[in-house]
Image: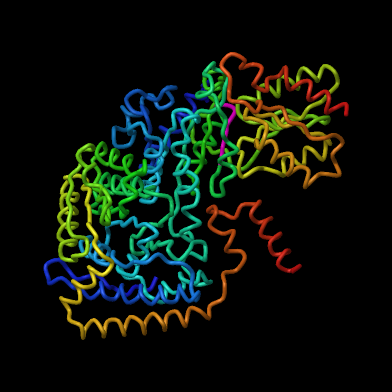
Amino acid sequence: MTQINMVQAINDALSSEMRRDERVVLLGEDVGKVGGVFRVTAGLYDEFGQDRVIDTPLAEGGIIGTSIGMALYGLRPVPEIQFADFIFPAFDQIVSEAAKMRWRSGGEYACPMVIRTPVGGGIRGGLYHSQSPEALFIHTAGLKVVCPSNPYDAKGLLLASIRDEDPVLFMEPKRVYRAVKMDVPDEDYEVELGKAKVVREGSGVTVVSWGAMVYEALTAAEQVGADGVDCEVIDLRTLWPLDVDTIVESVKKTGRLVVVHEAPKTCGFGAEVVQRVTEKAFLHLEAPPARVTGWDTPFPFTLENEYLPLAHRIAPALRSTASF
Amino acid sequence: MDVQPMASGDLSGEVNYEPVLRLRAIDDRLAELGEAGSIGFLPRAAGREAALVGTVAALNKGDWIFPTMADWAISIARGMALETFAHRIFGDARDPLRGHDIPAGTCAKSLNIASASAPAATHLPHAVGVSWAARQRGEQSIAAALFDGPEVDAAEFHTALNFAGVMKTPTLFICRVRPGEEGAVEHAVAYGLASAHCDGSDLAAVIETVAAAAERARSGGGSTVIDLELGGPDDAVEIAIAAVGREREGQIEGEAHQALSSALESASKTASPDLRSLFDDVYSGFENHLAEQLQEARQEAEDQ
């Protein structure tokens, strides 16, 4: 057990899995000699060499497209897209090719690969270093989408993702990268995909979130707790497939739901979470489900704290939902 | 999969033109059935027979082929049984792709033929990735990506050539160029790749050109961009008829029509795939939300 941050936990998962499974290869822009723009792959080029930690040309469609070929061959590629904001040149490869490969080939071919990419704002990165495009990928049949909120989950979810037989989009909240340290086992372990976690128990309002916003939800829950609003906070961890049961079970207890995410509100994943709960627990609801999200604008540079659903924006929503 | 070998024979022997004529006969009959509305849409293979048969003949069985949807006939050229192909045509319960894709959605893992998709040139980087992996594992297999002149405009064409040059992969980029099209070979130099071109209707020329590029790739010489220049739709067939004679052409056509008719007749009696198959193969496992939707779909079917 060692106290490490999320960057170290992901690096640990990658290196241990590469030692265990020679099929695992990393590729992307500057993942090799430089060790990645956030240093997540630091040291791996020296240990595993240029044939397993590959510096690629700067063309995201090519990074994912060649990874698909490697996966078809039988390798386990883990491509990195430097920022999720840059994933769109590879959108066609991800949604038209990787996601559909198993289905369109009647199960003859598969694309087991993990696309790692930093997401989210709060680092003063402006509109091209801050986005959270999860909904675009959840909407695509065939992809799994994962977003850990802490170092322990990051290591366990990444190991589970690399060993999964389907393509996984692994979103790393860059605001959390070095902000949180916690005990992480040195040994191998998996956090099962598709399982949410109740990170704070409560009976008054269910709060669903993921990634960096889990901390804001927890802070807001503490704030309103002083006023007698008792929140249960759920960290989804895997966004798709969604752990509906954990959310519904909680809402049946609380009767109230607030979903918090960084991405813009309209057609954001919060809408889907709300609708699933409405379908399965409508008669348990005592207030309209609420969303606290980014606005329907591009991600701003200056007014970052006004855009992000931080605790100061979540707390009023919790109070109004609790008192409805 | 049941395999009926149909390759053109080994390179040391004489060039076998018969598969060119067999493909044409099959293509003609499928086009008639398509026009009559008896089967779904298939793009015409006419004009590309020598390019497909020659590519198959020049490559080893273990080499990967990444076709476009217009190259559905490559599966037959590489040995897919017509019975299997007929089930593909109908997308029925015995279709290897379970009715998930249109008949042109070529795919046959047992023949090392990758799954074709419709977006332009997206399969070219896949060929680079596969061949990189094979080389990295010390294997002799290479990959050939087939595409057509207009795809040279697509971003992924240039991306794939760039990656192939940087990663020094054993990949063949085989472009079928029709009259008036620009072709791919002029771009090879920009990415540090070799290039070659030949008459794509001339089976012997195709085999020689592709085989030379394959040999270069296998011996560490990297990728080659190849233009197979096509003329009229009948050019390849006329060269083949000149080689085998009219009489033999008639026999090949008769045999192919009979075999295809019999395969289609038999396949046409097969039931549609089960509703469950719609939800299979989305993921490796059967996820809960799909299980729920299958139940909904079954309920809808029952209520109707």
Q: Is residue A57 magenta?
A: no
Residue at point 59%, 58% (across, down): B279
Residue A6, x across and y down, in percent: 52, 25
User: Please, is residue A149 above or below residue B43 in the view?
Assistant: above
Residue at point 49%, 36% (across, down): A188
Quarter of the rendering occupied by the C terminus of chain A: top right
Q: Is residue B101 visible?
A: yes
Furthest residue to the front?
B180
Magenta stretch: give its range. A145-151
Residue B154, x across and y down, in percent: 36, 44
Left or right of residue A38, residue B300 in this image: right
Residue A211, x across and y down, in percent: 60, 28
Residue A81, x across and y down, in percent: 44, 32
Furthest residue to the top?
A302
User: Please, is residue A95 above or below residue A43 in the view?
Assistant: below
Residue at point 50%, 24% (across, down): A128
Q: Is residue A19 visible?
A: no
Q: Nearer the viewer, residue A5 or A122?
A: A122
Q: Is residue A146 magenta?
A: yes
